[in-house]
Image: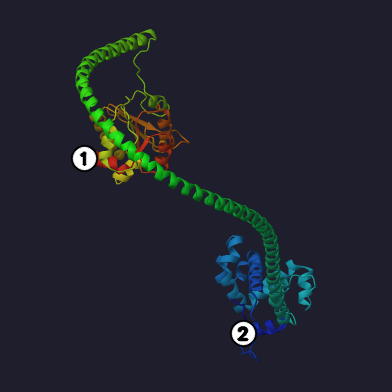
Amino acid sequence: MPLTEPHDDHSSAEESLVGAHDAGETPAAPPEPEPTLPEPVRQRIVTLTAAVLPGLAADEVPVPLRRVAKFAPNRRARLGAPAIAAQLTADPLFRQRVTARVLADAGDLGAAVVEGTAPAAADPVEVAALAYLARPRGWRELIEASGAAVRAEADSAVVAELVREAEQRATRAEHDRAVARVEAEKLRDELARVREELGQLREEARQITRTLRETQARERKATEMLATERGRAARAAADADAELRRARARLAEAEAAAGVARVSAKEARSVDEARLWLLLETIGQAAVGLRRELALDPVDKLPADFVADAFADQPGATPAGAATRARDTDDPARLDQLLALPRAHLVVDGYNVTKRGFGEMSLEQQRKRLITGLGGIAAQTGDEVTVVFDGAERIHGLPPAPRGVRVLFSRKGETADELIRRLVRAEPAGRPVVVVSSDREVADGVRRHGAYPLGADSLLRRLARS
């Protein structure tokens, strides 16, 4: 927004204009239009005025700017810019008071501008701002020179940017040429290799042609030998017919002997079965004796319990059964098949299932509903059931889990997905482990360790059916 103000070129003329206005007289000549200020010059004028505004007496500050004068320094020029610009344009006396303080702060540069000259090394924006406020002879030319200097700097920046982009393009072109030369060398090497392989293929083709001719010669010789052998085969067929008749007679004798042998074999099988039963009974007795010899007591902890000790809110939670390894499916019938396997272990990604099945509930209600449903599955199947929740939602003082259901929370810095993988790795090879989660990363991870991943929908449908 340009600062415009109808005034003459000198301060004395401005004072005369103000006096004439106070006396109620009409100026002799129409005012000249204000020049259009470059944006940097306009901003600098507002900044200089805002800086000296608090130093003016209360009666010297126009009413619209008295509130602006109370702003903080960093907000005064930014928020009060429109009001400051309007007062500088409309109130010559206010501008003269601001100019006096600004020129005093500017020092030698302000004195030079008042004289109508500007040092060559001075900032053109600063010179134009002081010239606008002081209005010395030729101040319009100083503002126009400042605008030209600002535009020249902008043009120089554009030219510098264009030069930099041109240099970058030249560098990229040189790099592309170097890459092209390297690729050309590779292509030449590849062409030489292909030519060498072509020569080898031609030599192999010549050898194959020679082998084909030899094979054709052997085939003609084999045809002649085949005709001779056919004659011999006819004679042999006649001899075979005679031998077949003799063989049939021997077969009848053999069948009679086989009947007798079957009876003997049945008796021998009964004896073998008795021996096998005795052997199994002996092995069972030996296993019992070996367990007694090694003092192997019945185990009271399962592999998942050793992982669960570091995570479970209830260390005494009773483990349940196990799960089977299955294909990735949401079919509840497949879940039933896997849970029917002996010693199966079912591991459930808790929040992955609850937020998919009943996410409208609170987290506490989600956990309670899932754990209750898993208790029913554990009671029906007798399998080991473990449900894992993220530790970020750990709630102390949870009610006891149903019999056969282990409830775990991941530790700080570890997710439920990582805890599930640890549970799967803790199981012995060959034990069926089923992991229920619709998280693809979890499914892929447990599948690599031999577990059977199933989608959350399979368990939700199974729970809805119960």
Question: Which mark is first along the chain, 1 or 2?
Answer: 2
Task: Left or right? Give the position of 200 relative to 455.
Answer: right
In three-dimensional space, the C-alpha distance between marks 2 and 1, rounded to whole angstroms, equals: 95 Å
* Viewer-closest of 82 and 413: 413
Q: How far from the left and from the top, in percent, is residue 336?
A: 26, 36
Q: Label 1: which residue?
A: 465
* Viewer-closest of 303 and 14: 303
Badge 2 density bin: few <14, some 14–19, many ≥20, Cα 10 Å: few
Task: Left or right? Give the position of 17 relative to 288.
Answer: right
Q: Amino acid at mark 2?
A: His
Badge 1 density bin: few <14, some 14–19, many ≥20, Cα 10 Å: few
* Viewer-closest of 86 and 56: 86
- Identify whether 79 is placed above or below 393: below
Q: Label 2: which residue?
A: 21
* Viewer-closest of 135 and 406: 406
Q: Nearer the viewer, mark 2 or mark 1?
A: 1
Q: At 44% across and 33% down in the image, what residue appears?
A: 411
Q: How far from the left and from the top, in percent, is residue 381?
A: 25, 29
Task: Give the SS element for disc 1.
Answer: helix
Quarter of the image holding residue 267?
top left
Contact check, label 2 and label 1, Cβ < 8 Å: no
Task: Left or right? Give the position of 308 relative to 466.
Answer: right
Q: Amino acid at mark 1?
A: Arg
Q: How far from the left and from the top, in percent, is residue 110?
A: 76, 71
Q: How far from the left and from the top, in percent, is residue 82?
A: 56, 72
